[in-house]
Amino acid sequence: MTVSNDIRSFLATNNSEHISIAMLGLDSVNQVLELIELHSTIDGSLTLKIFCAIDNHIEAVFKALLQTHPAIHLVAIEGCQRVKLNHGRLIIDFHLGDYEQQLRQQPLSNSLISYWLCTSRFAAQSIEQALFWQMAKHSQDNCHCLISDELPTDSQQTLLALCDLVGFNVEKSMLSSASSIADNVLLMERQALRAQQSSQQAPYPIQTAESTTEIAVIGGGIASASLVLSLAERHKKISVFCEDSELAQAASGNKQGAIYPLLTPDNNTLSQYFQQAYLFSLHRLNALAVNNYPIDFDLCGVLHTGHDDRSRKRVQKIINGHPWNADIAHAVNEKQSSEIAGVEINEAGIFYPLGGWVAPQDLTKASFKRAQQLSDVNVQLNTQVTALEKSDAGWFLINNQQRLGPYKTVVVANGKSLTRFEQTKHLQITGFRGQVSHAPTRAKLSNLSTVLCAHGYMTPKNNALHCLGASYVKDADNLAYSPQEQVDNLHKIQHSYLDKDWNRDIDITKHSARVGVRMVTRDHAPMMGPAPDLDAIMSLYNNHQLTPASRKFWQNTPAPVHKGLYILGGLGSRGLSSGLLAAEALAAQLCGETMPLSTDFVALLNPNRMWMRKLLKGKALE
């Protein structure tokens, strides 16, 4: 099936609006390429959602897509993978796995689907009534459904009946009149499904911004930069407030940072999120590089090994605990690890072939520069916001007795200062000091060709330096250089690979290092979403606690939030892997668009999760 004349007509008629189209199955890579080319000729923005089974066909499609678009590297794993093209105006979400399950897990949004395509790859066993009701739940009232004539006749007839059942328009003309809109009974059925899911989402609220005319973002690191880029792609006006004299001066200022997913043996929700987020980070990085933004990086892979009996067992438990896609992670033996690393390792472990390292400061500055080329982005340096004040007109940002604003929408994305404000001081997140050591490259050391991760980590050379580290000190009272932490960093990598001549080449005597603070959550997931109103939560808690009735109350009552105030932070030590997708999801949430997250991921990232997990179980709050 090629892009039909109906879709061409629809895109041409709605070329200044944001529209959503969805496909069940994917015939070939040409379907995607034709839509990409078609969309490049119009002004509006488009979200294309492609639902596919995980099989050899989709893997072949992904390989073909990579050949034509080098910035896109998709992996056949369950869940949603987002690709952004045509200056961010075209969003393609690949939903892999069971169609109905993927739709059930998709959060509600204001961006409803206008057009469904049932392709010839739509498996007959998936054609069920429950699936079509899930499709209808996420669709506009006058949604159109096009059925491929390459499908078997009996499948076409079944699909026509299901379209009629849920109220889809299956006429040939896209430009339908009001008569094609589903009748009131069917619309009420859809509304009931939405209400049901909305109730299920209540503990972890999704809050569309009241106004996106101008958005204030506090912070100047990788979290802020990623959010600003995602908002700029949506042509939003953004004011950025950074307390430093330059961008990316805190944790995002490190010379090299590893990029690879955090996996767990059972591939739990956190592990699944990291895989999706890591792939989006790679897409962002490659897209900026392809467009000639200066970023030092090398996707040379990451080699993860143990350093003692306990850690070796942990590494083996991870790699053996789940049938990982080989592009995500695969096991290596002692010989293979040395071949990959270019130096003698002699440790079995896990290799992440798509990972590597990137200069966070370069990525941060490139993201801001790209954003400023796409939209109205004003960056104010040397502007420390010390307090937030709520008024009827919006939020005021306090700086040296000045009141900046008001802004209807404010995002706190300021790294180590995330808990500075009255509204955010109780967020369950902790700062950890990290000193990264720099060592000049030498003959044997220069052969290192992949990122090493064991007791410590070490990167291949860049600008004649290697990075190793990092220290991990909770609530440190200063950010001064530490000679002890410098030695500790050296010992970590030497103890990981004992009696190796190459690591005896590591020279830290020049005392070259960099210290930053990473904000870490107890569950290692970032925080993304509306700022929780803890006072309001505690007020409700006084009357609803420790009973079956209280659990039901919290399950069905929208958790209180500060209207117009949002959080993006807690990226920890793997922010390059986890933060960029969180930023894209928050931008989509602010603008009322579909997020590239499942409802499980929304709950995982929500800033109120630590409290809500206890309340939903009927446990006492501390």
Image (cartoon, rainbow, N blue to C red):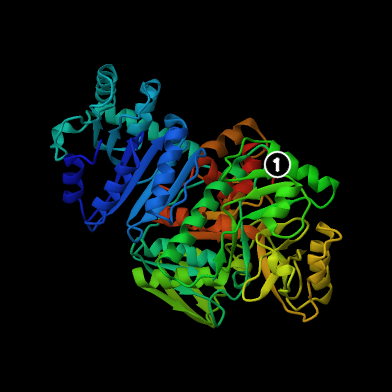
Q: Is residue 200 above or below residue 391?
A: above
Q: Position of residue 559 (x, y in %)?
A: 53, 46
The residue lying furthest to the top in this view is 154
User: What residue is shown at x 36% (from left), y 51% (from top)?
Assistant: 91
Q: Is residue 273 above or below residue 464?
A: above
Q: Is residue 600 left or right of residue 178?
A: right
Secondary structure of the residue carrying numbered label 1 = helix
Viewport quadrant of the N terminus: top left
Q: Is residue 357 above or below residue 608?
A: below
Nearer to me, 278 or 564: 278
Q: Position of residue 476 (x, y in %)?
A: 76, 69
Nearer to me, 406 or 181: 181
Which quadrant of the structure image shows residue 414? Answer: bottom right
Q: What residue is shown with label 1?
A: 318
Name the kind of residue labelled 1 in the image. Answer: Ile
- Count residues near mark 1 (Cα–Cα under 10 Å), then give few for <14, some for 14-19, many for 20+: many
Q: Is residue 147 visible?
A: yes
Q: Position of residue 307 (x, y in %)?
A: 81, 53
Q: Position of residue 320 (x, y in %)?
A: 70, 37
Which quadrant of the structure image shows residue 9? Answer: top left
User: What residue is shown at x 31% (from left), y 48% (from top)?
Assistant: 33
Which quadrant of the structure image shows residue 379? Answer: bottom left
Q: Is residue 547 left or right of residue 110?
A: right
Q: How many marks?
A: 1
Q: Is residue 547 above or below residue 502?
A: above
User: What residue is shown at x 38% (from left), y 57% (from top)?
Assistant: 210
User: What residue is shown at x 48% (from left), y 73% (from top)?
Assistant: 294
Q: Is residue 452 left or right of residue 297?
A: right
